Every structure is written in structure tokens, then in C-alpha cells.
Image (cartoon, rainbow, N blue to C red):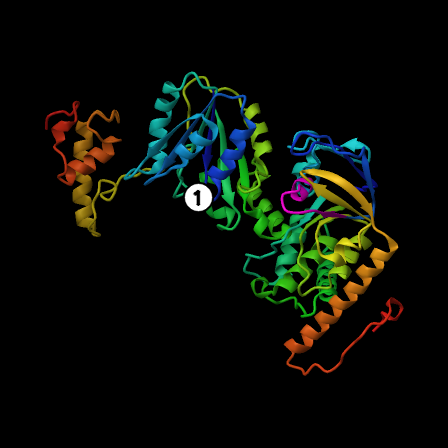
Amino acid sequence: MKVIIFGGTPGSGKTSIIKFIIEELKDFKIHYVKFDVLDTTDDTLIKEKFGISTEKKISEDVCPDHYAALEIPKIIRKNQDKDLIIIETAGLCLRCSPYVKEGLAVNVLNILAGKPKCYGPLLTDADLVVVSKGDLISQAEREIFRSKILEVNKSALIIDGNGLTGEGAIDVAEKIRETPEAKDKLTLKNSMPTAICGYCYGNRILGSEESLERYNKGKNLKSRLANLNCGACGFKSCNEFIRAVLDGKVEENKCPYIKEK
Amino acid sequence: MVIKKISILPGYDKDGEKENQDEIDIFEGQKIGIVGPTGSGKSQLLYDIEKLAFGETKTRRKIKINEKKADKVLKIDPAKKIIGYLTQHMNFMTDTSVYKFLKIHVETRGKHRTEEETEELIRKVIEDANKITGEQIKKDTNLLILSGGQSRALMVADLAHISESPIILIDEIENAGIKIKQALDLLIKKGKIVFLVTHDPILALDTDKRFVMKNGKINKVINTSVKEKEIADYLSWINDYILDIREEVREGKQVNQLRILCSLTEKEK
């Protein structure tokens, strides 16, 4: 099974380009997963258009890339009969990106959206950079942009892509064909930034005292959980459960693994 | 890289029917027009050429350069890329001066030049751009405030001098604000092969031949007649006249000279 991860800022044209790529890879048994923050209909659109299996994963309160990292192993386990898993993420802060060493990491980069050096691992760890919307600016600027990408990611293969015409799709499809099968456990290309402060545990009052108080409560509760992200409590992750407990929305005994105080 | 000849080997149209002609050869310094209604396959043909396709695209066309299949590095490395592209849109997004922008572009092309050579190249780009646009571009003008005509002129001159791609693809360039024929002459003078999608008669009738597209294939190849070249010349003269008056209007002058051209031989103003 091959694992292909697409990352890119909202509106960069990821989904449009992926559609053209799926068209090129009809001989594969594909499973498509879309990660998004609040909602998406891309999974149903792609299912209707190509008749392949799809699913959507909505991260809500959790960082979508951390959430993807949690969910990817489960997705792979459930789809052992597929030869290709295409995962489209909703990277937001550009710092996390659930690219894995054992698969192909594709960054769809909107040429109008800013300087390459302002991007983090989303761009710097990509194997393939698909530059979109290049048709809106001059060739000279496209060439300059390209050299700026190479300054931050020397080994990237850069492809001009266009979500309207499908330009670039055959090149990405070719790289997907060359990607080796992912056999063992997947490993992230970069470690994701730590996210531990009172605000991560749901504090909303801007103030160091309140934040610290919330942090201590959260840390204490976390130390009593099994941290399996098993979902038995009805929440996607332990962190989300902790936030809900601290907000008084749910009792802590909803977690089947919780240790007594 | 010197390109003496490009060959287009026939592919298939949208219904899987093979293109009528055998190999089409295009030689150094030629201008080829691509015409046809929306959806007839004009952009796909440009795409096949840009990709130096060899059977892998939808049309399964094969493009040969100097009788051979193109080396892969020519497709990927921008410094070695042999295709230059002038698209419909030529907006700039970099907030910098014309001079600085051209300088960055020269450096990006990776070819080593001395300080003087670089300065000379930039000077030439701006000088030639100003020959094809009415409103003058200065080296310290900010890119973002260039008019449509100025941007197009600057990009054509940039393509002629800095991007040394021997093959140029032009997709429906607008002629507003530039002397379009002179712009193309500037590219051709540099020995480039130019493919242009256009229905602008000044351009389409000034080519060496034009491909008529239909249902995804090259349906017909028309060799431009002498008469057509004359018509193109005449229309170009009218376009320049319009551009001159446009400048007079811009400068706040009263326009009072009516120029009438009775025959092509008295074209000189």
C-alpha cells in the first residue's frame, strides 16, 4: 500500500488537483481521506465522481494535523485491501504537517499566497511541491518563486500545477507510481510542535494566572488518563475530553481508564 | 541550446481519431499561429509542446526537438528549460522596483554574469520594453503600479533578453497598450520559435503558418499568404496609430491629426 499525503493552505487548489490525479490513477484501488477543521463535502464529491471509497475527518477543536497523525494508523488498518491511500490535510499553521517518511509528501503551494521562506515543514519537508495559480502571474515571477522554494527545500521536485486544466497531474501521478509501498509503522518527517499551555486546555481568559491554573488542572487530569485517544468517552482525543471536563460539560468518569485521584 | 527544428507527430482527437497530417516540422525563427473555437484543443496543444510530450498526454502527441526525444532535464530545470511562456495574465505580485525585479530574475537564471553585463542586460530590457509600449517605464517604477500595457511590454522584453528559452508559447496575449507586432519581432529577431494562440488578426496573419484546431486535433495547416501578411501589416499600422493617439489623450493633448493610409507602400509615418 502506498500512502500519499497532500498538504497546503486553504484555497491552494489541493482538491481540484487531486481530482485530476485520481483520473490518472484509475488502475489503483484508492481510498481518499479528507481532513478538515469544520466541515467538508469533498469526500462525497469525489465518491460521486470516481466511485472510489472516501471518508471525511473533522478535527474541530484539535489541530487538524495532530488529529491526522492520530487517525492515519487507524485509516490504514481499516483499508488493507487498497493499494493507494490519498490523504488530504487541512494544514493551518504550516508548522505541523503529518508527512511521513514512508510515503510521498506533496505540498500544493499557491504562488499568490506569500513567500516560500514563511512556510515551515509543510513546504520544507515536502518531496513534491505543486505550484498552483502560476498562470495568474508572469513567467519571470514564476521562475523567481521557484528558486525561492529551492532555497528552503533543496531536494523538492517542483511541478507547475493547475486545478482548472489539470496541468501537472500526470507528473504527480508518475511520482506516485514510483513511491514505494509503506510496510511497517509510519514515522513523521518532523516532530510536531508542543501544544501545552492553559489555552490548549481550553482557557479563554487572557491572563497568565488563569492560564496557569487551567494548565495545572489539565496536566493533573492528563496524568490520570491512559492517553490512548481511544474515543470511548465520545471525544476524538484525550485532550478534547480534558477540555470538556474542565469546562464542566462532561463528567470525568466518562473515561473508562481514568485513575482515582 | 540551439533549436533548429521542432517536429509535432500526430496524436488523436477527442473521439480517438488520428490527426490528418504526418509530422509537422517547424524551424528556427518561425511563427506559428493556433486558431479555433473554445474547446477545440488550442491550450492542450500548447501544453503538449510545453511538456515536450512524448505520448503521455491526453492527445498522445509526440514532440521532437532536433529530430530527437527531449531530455528529461530540459523539462524540469528552469535554467535549462527551453520553453518560455507568455500567458494571458501578467500581473505582478512582488512589491519592488522594475530594476530590482529584473536583477533578481537575471540572478535566478543562474548564468554567471559580471556586474556590468547584468546592468547592460537590464538596461536593454527596459529600453526594448519602452519601444513597444506607449507609456514609458522607468527603472525605479514600482512593479505593482505598471499598467497592463507596460507589464506586457516588460515581460516580452524580459522573455527576449533574460529568459533565453528558444521556444516561446503565447496564450491569447492582449494587444491593448502595446505595439504587438513589434513585440513579436523582438522575439523572432532573437531566433526563437514562437507558437501563439490568438484570434487577433494582426498576429494571426503575420505568422508563417497557422494550425486550425477542431475537436482536439490539428485539423488543417494554412500557410500564410503574401496578401495576408500585407493585411497584417496594415492592421498593425492602425494599431500603432491608435496607440499614438491614446498617448496624446493620456498626456491631455487635443488630437487634431487624422492619418489616413491609402496604400501599404506609404506606411512610413
* Residue B41 among those drawn in magenta: yes
Q: Position of residue B230 (x, y in %)?
A: 85, 60
Residue A30 vs residue A225: left or right?
A: right
- Residue type beneath disc 1: Thr
Q: Quadrant of the C terminus of chain A?
A: top left
The residue at 62%/47% (across/down) is A143
Does residue B81 appear anywhere in the picture? no
Circle 1 is placed at which residue position? A9
Say if the magenta span includes residue A50: no
Q: Can you tell which quarter of the image residue B66 is in?
A: top right
Q: Residue at x 29, y 37 (%)?
A: A62
First to last magenta residue range: B33-45
Residue B122 falls in which quadrant of the image?
Answer: bottom right
**Front-lying residue, A72 or A115:** A72
Q: Position of residue B148 (x, y in %)?
A: 62, 63
* Along the viewing direction, whichever of B27 and B92 lies nearer the viewer: B27
Residue B30 can be seen, yes or no: yes
Q: Chain of mark 1?
A: A
Classify A7 as above or below A26: below
Q: How many marks?
A: 1
Assess disc 1: are there few (<14), some (14-19) or many (≥20) residues with their C-alpha within 10 Å of its C-alpha.
some
Rendered position, B211 above or below A72: below
Q: Considering the numbered disc 1 on the image, is that residue within a helix, a strand or a loop?
A: loop
Viewer-proximal residue among B126 and A155: B126
Give left or right: position of A152 versus A67: right
Q: Horizontal placement of B149 versus A76: left or right?
A: right
As drawn, the residue found furthest toward the right would be B265
Residue extending furthest toward the left: A261
